[in-house]
Amino acid sequence: MSESSNGGEDSLIQWASDGGSRFTGTFTLAYISTSGRHIDTSNSSVSGLISKGTIEITINGNQFSGTVSPTALSIGIPSSSGTITNFTFAPGTEGEYNGFLSQLRSTVADNVNAYDQQQRYSNAFSQLLEP
């Protein structure tokens, strides 16, 4: 199991080896919605091959390559502009992933509270301006 947290998102890759160099598993991504008012999630299948510190991984039909060690999994993912962004995952537990998810939920709650407070101020100001 490997996890990565990046500001408004948290991801988890879980896999099992076939006893050799091949593996299969799942990729889970949790992220704050564009509205900032809730958390969206996405799940995909993963499969791949690990050999001599390198990894070829297929996530939801898209193939990526990177490096793997006992302490990190790093995958290069091309952006729409063609540049490669490296995502690094560290070994983790489901409890640690759930902790990151709890932090995301807290951020969403803060966003909702700030928005609601802004709406109350805006409504109160509008009432002051009414004839």
Image (tube, rainbow, N blue to C red):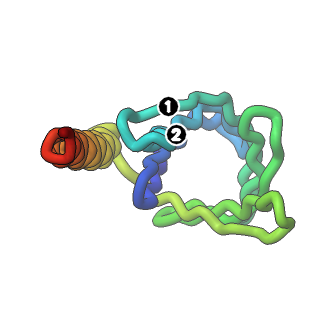
Residues tagged 2 and 1 counted as in contact (Cβ below 8 A)? yes
Indicate the position of residue 70 as horizontal and vertical percent values. 50, 63
Could you tell me which residue is drawn at 45 percent across and 60 percent down? 6
Find the residue positioned furthest to the front.
131
The residue where tag 1 is placed is 41
Query: Which kind of residue does numbered mark 2 sit on?
Result: Leu
Q: Quadrant of residue 5?
A: bottom left
Residue situated in front as seen by the camera: 47 or 98: 98
Q: Secondary structure at mark 1?
A: strand
Q: Who comes first in sequence, dot 2 or dot 1?
A: 2
Q: Quadrant of the C terminus?
A: top left
Q: Quadrant of residue 119?
A: top left
Is residue 102 visible from the viewing direction of this image? Answer: no
Indicate the position of residue 107 as horizontal and vertical percent values. 27, 49
Does residue 90 appear to the left or right of 106 in the view shown?
right
Does residue 63 appear to the left or right of 93 in the view shown?
right
Indicate the position of residue 8 as horizontal and vertical percent values. 42, 53
Q: Secondary structure at mark 2?
A: strand
Query: Which kind of residue does numbered mark 1 sit on?
Result: Thr
The residue where tag 2 is placed is 29
Could you tell me which residue is drawn at 48 percent across and 49 percent down? 2
In the displayed structure, 66 sits above or below 95; it is below
Residue situated in front as seen by the camera: 127 or 72: 127
**Across the whole image, how many numbered discs are drawn on residues?**
2
Does residue 104 appear to the left or right of 116 in the view shown?
right
Could you tell me which residue is drawn at 72 percent across and 64 percent down? 76
Q: Residues within 10 Å of mark 2 (few under 14, many from 20)?
A: some
Indicate the position of residue 110 as horizontal and vertical percent values. 21, 47
Is residue 67 visible from the viewing direction of this image? Answer: yes
